[in-house]
Amino acid sequence: MERLQAFKFELRPNGEQTRQLWQFAGCSRFVYNKALALQQENHKAELKYISYVQMCKSLTTWRKDQATLWLQLAPAQTLQQSLKDLDRAYQNFFSKRAAFPSYKKKGRGNSFRFPEPKQFKLDQTNNRIFLPKLGWMRYRNSRNVIGTLRNITVSERGGKWFFSIQTAQQVDTPLHPSTTAIGLDLGIAIFAAQSDGVIHLPKNSFTQLQRQLAHAQRSLARRCKYSRNWKKQKAKIARLYIRIANVRADYLHQKSHLICKNHAVVCIEDLKVSNMSRSASGTRQAPGKNVKAKSGLNRAILDQGWGEFRRQLGYKLKWAGGDLIVVPAQYTSQQCSGCGHIAQENRKIQESFCCVSCGHAENADVNAAKNIVAAGHAVMACGGDVRPELHEHAVKAAPVKQEPTEAIQACA
């Protein structure tokens, strides 16, 4: 099987190279926004969609125009990749996989990409990399890059520049050394509860630095906007957010690696985080209720990183030879893992579960995890998909019928 893997490192450019990196990112952003404006004007005129090939011809004209002659300072391949990113964004919008493309703002998501491996050179022995029009640059080498080089993406985060190299390598189809299957119930008070009774406590990286972040934001509000001290304070806040994200990502990688190493099959719920963390403020005509409490709940949900955790479990289990099974989330916390009775009264408080039918009592999250692994066994035995519309062939294939809870229990 072909294994795609990315390796990310921090660049150490000099002053001139740093200026060029910002310049290349700005040129790529300008081309993306100009092409998006052209597509919108073309749509208002009720003309056909401009394809990527036609847009590349416009790019050639822009690079020769006296008003935008500075586009020649950036490599042509990076500008073409901006057009390809816009075309992909439109295709995702047409397929209803994403929202309508929006303009890129200066200072957010600064990046550019070289799509061909012949455009760059990697010298791991001397910890340096060669990029077109930038020359050789040092980087912090933390691990060896393995596989055939495919492409490279240069991005900025918190004032620092990084590059990510995608590689491909042919490996034997892995066979997971373990034969166990577990269910995972994700939560806030307990980050993840396994069906075998193992509990993973949450990290809550945002909560740990929330007071420090609030103090820095109040200090920013007292400064003159766009002044030098205002920019310094804004950069400090950005570094705090990056620290929060890094702590969360490190914790998720540790837990996902531990679970994928010890279990061949992992069953999780299909949690729609965007719906769960939706604001309750409402509108002026119909204001919401308990807005402050719901805001705190949303903050706690997003602090866990459930979506990223599911993504990490998916590719790590695939690399190890295991499987990730996604099951519907309905009634997993109200169903008794002993007799299957479903009732809201089974879980009167957050921590404990007590069945009103058979009297079975245990930790509520562990009970839900047992229901999840049972539903996962049913999915493996009977087949089915939770959300087939997310698959690339869902438009051609008929949607899979979802079985009720009673049918899942019968299959299990």
Image (cartoon, grey):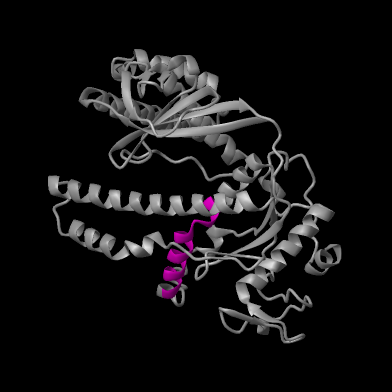
Please say whether residue 236 is one of the residues in the magenta stretch: no
Residue depicted at x 52% and y 68%: 190
Task: Please state if 24 lies on the left or on the right of 99 as rendered.
Answer: left
Q: Which corner quadrant of the image does residue 401 belong to?
A: bottom right
Residue depicted at x 58% and y 39%: 92
Q: In this view, which residue lies farthest toward the right? A: 410
Q: Position of residue 39 (x, y in %)?
A: 48, 31
Residue depicted at x 42% and y 33%: 37
Q: As displayed, is residue 219 above or below residue 88?
A: below
Residue 240 visible from this viewpoint: yes
Magenta residue span: 293-309
* Nearer to the camera, 276 or 368: 368
Please say whether residue 307 is one of the residues in the magenta stretch: yes
Q: As displayed, is residue 74 above or below residue 262?
A: above
* Nearer to the camera, 180 or 388: 180
Q: As displayed, is residue 66 above or below residue 191?
A: above
Magenta highlight: main SS: helix
Q: Which corner quadrant of the image does residue 196 belong to?
A: bottom right
Q: Position of residue 238 (x, y in %)?
A: 29, 49
Q: How many marks?
A: 0
Q: As displayed, is residue 278 above or below residue 347?
A: above
Task: Please state if 135 lies on the left or on the right of 382 as rendered.
Answer: left
Q: Position of residue 197 (x, y in %)?
A: 63, 68
Q: Quadrant of the N terminus?
A: top right
* Nearer to the camera, 147 or 262: 262
Residue 42 visible from this viewpoint: no
